[in-house]
Image (cartoon, rainbow, N blue to C red):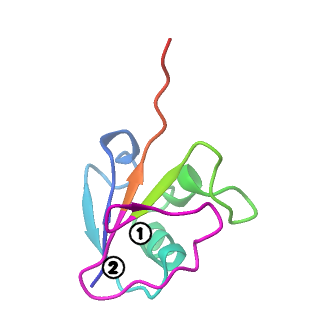
Amino acid sequence: MPQVHIPSRYRVPTKGEGRIEVEASTVKACIEAVEALYPGFQELLLNAKGELHLTSKLFLNGELLDRNALDTPVSGDDIVAVLAPAAGG
């Protein structure tokens, strides 16, 4: 099953879980599956239209995904990694 890797700043909804296995066939379905287990997670990544927030980044097996690639297929041992935005100054 695919895994979703979640940075510590996004682990409040997941109750501290950083790696969650899900049954899903696309990147977006992975996010929705984590949301089903841990309500509040999806809103950290997607806006009301279901699009990736401008500050969010997703990786599939270490490769940065295009903002419009949420329908990218996943399977088996794929890893969807979330990169949390960082503020600096």
| Number of numbered discs on residues | 2
Identify the magenta region: 60-80
Which residue is disc 1 drawn over?
A: 34
Marks 2 and 1: CB-CB under 8 Å?
yes
Residue nearest the observer in this picture, 75 or 61: 61
Location of residue 61 (image quadrant): bottom left
Q: Which mark is residue 22?
A: 2
Q: Is disc 2 placed on a helix, strand or loop?
A: loop
| Picture quadrant of residue 38 | bottom left
Identity of the residue furthest to the front in this view? 63
| Horizontal side of residue 35 vs 6, given as left or right | right
From the viewer's perspective, tell me whether residue 25 is left or right of residue 21: right
Quarter of the image where the N terminus is located: bottom left
Mark 1: secondary structure: helix
Crowding near the residue tagged with mark 2, few <14, some 14–19, many ≥20 C-alpha atoms within 10 Å = some
Kindly identify the amino acid type of the residue bearing the numbered disc 2.
Val
Residue sitting nearer the eye, 64 or 3: 64
